[in-house]
C-alpha cells in the first residue's frame, strides 16, 4: 500500500470528525436560542447573547447563521424535531402499556406523560409561543407557527385517533386543541397546572 492510500482513511476520519463537530455546535447554538427565547423573549436573541449562552467564542453564531431570521427558522425546526421525538417516545410507551395492561392504563400513561412534559419542558412551550407570535408578524418566518403547532399536537392527535379506533367522526382536532391549550396556558402562567384526570377525561371523551 502506497503512502497516498494510507492517508485516505485518516483524511476521511478527519472530515467525519469535522462534520460531527459542526453538527454538535449547531445543536448547542439552537438549544441556546430556545433558552433565550424562553427567558428573554425574541428581543433577547442576539448573536452575541447566543454565543454567551452557548459558551462559544464570539462570532460562532454569526458564522453558522449570518441573519437572525435564518437563526430563528433553524431554532423553530430544531424545536419541531424535539416535539416529534417526544411523540415517538410516547407512542412506544403507549403500545407497551396497551399490550400489557389494557387501553385504560395506556390512556392514563399518556395523560401522566403530557402533564409531566408541561412541567419538565416549560422553556420549550415559552419558546414556541415567542416564535409563533413572531411568525404572525414577520413574513420571513411565515409557516413557523403552523409547523410548531402541528408538531406539538401530533402526539395528542395520534392517541385520540388510536383510542377512537380510527372513527371518522372522532373529534381529533378538537381534543388535540383542548389539551394543547390547557398545557400552553399553564406553561405561560395563565392557567392552573393540568391534572391527569383532566387530560384523561378529554382523551376518554372519544371512547
Image (cartoon, rainbow, N blue to C red):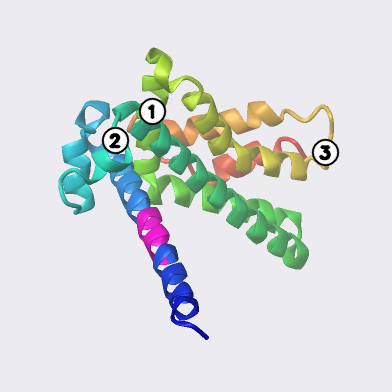
Distance in Å between CA atoms under marks 3 and 2? 37 Å
* Mark 3 or mark 2, whichever is nearer to me: 2
Cα–Cα span, label 1 and label 3: 32 Å
Q: At numbered mark 3, what does the secondary structure look like: helix, strand or loop?
A: loop
Q: Nearer the viewer, residue 4 or 52?
A: 4
Tell me which secondary structure the magenta stretch mostly adopts. Answer: helix
Q: Which residue is mark 1?
A: 131
Mark seen at residue 166: 3
Magenta residue check for 85: no
Using the image, determine if residue 89 lies above or below residue 202: below
Position in image of residue 68 (x %, y %): 29, 29
Q: Quadrant of the C terminus?
A: top right
Q: Which residue sits at x=15%, y=46%?
A: 58
The label on residue 37 is: 2
- Mark 2 residue element: helix
Sequence-wise, which precedes: disc 3 or disc 2?
A: 2
The stretch of residues the image draws in magenta is 17-24
Mark 1 or mark 3: name the one nearer the start of the chain: 1
Disc 2 and disc 1 in contact, CB within 8 angstroms: yes
The stretch drawn in magenta includes residue 19: yes
**Can residue 186 be seen here?**
no
Q: Tell me the SS state at disc 1.
A: helix
Q: Is residue 52 left or right of residue 123?
A: left
Percent of width and height locating residue 129: 39, 29
Work out which residue is located at the far front of the displayed protein and give it: 2
Amino acid at each position: 500500500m502506497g503512502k497516498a492510500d494510507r492517508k485516505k482513511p485518516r483524511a476521511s476520519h478527519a472530515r467525519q470528525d469535522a462534520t460531527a463537530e459542526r453538527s454538535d455546535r449547531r445543536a448547542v447554538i439552537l438549544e441556546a436560542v430556545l433558552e433565550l427565547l424562553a427567558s428573554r423573549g425574541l428581543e433577547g436573541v442576539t448573536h452575541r447573547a447566543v454565543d454567551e449562552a452557548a459558551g462559544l467564542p464570539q462570532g460562532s453564531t454569526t458564522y453558522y447563521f449570518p441573519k437572525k431570521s435564518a437563526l430563528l427558522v433553524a431554532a423553530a425546526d430544531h424545536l419541531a424535531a424535539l416535539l416529534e421525538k417526544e411523540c415517538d417516545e410516547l407512542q412506544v410507551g403507549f403500545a407497551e402499556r396497551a399490550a400489557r395492561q389494557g387501553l385504560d392504563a395506556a390512556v392514563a400513561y399518556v395523560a401522566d406523560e403530557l402533564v409531566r412534559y408541561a412541567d419538565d419542558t416549560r422553556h420549550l412551550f415559552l419558546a414556541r409561543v415567542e416564535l409563533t407570535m413572531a411568525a404572525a408578524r414577520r413574513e420571513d418566518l411565515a409557516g413557523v407557527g403552523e409547523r410548531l403547532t402541528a408538531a406539538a399536537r401530533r402526539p395528542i392527535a395520534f392517541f385520540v385517533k388510536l383510542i377512537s379506533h380510527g372513527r371518522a367522526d372522532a373529534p381529533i382536532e378538537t381534543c388535540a386543541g383542548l389539551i394543547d391549550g390547557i398545557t400552553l396556558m399553564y406553561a405561560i402562567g395563565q392557567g392552573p397546572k393540568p391534572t391527569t384526570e383532566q387530560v384523561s377525561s378529554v382523551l376518554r371523551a372519544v371512547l
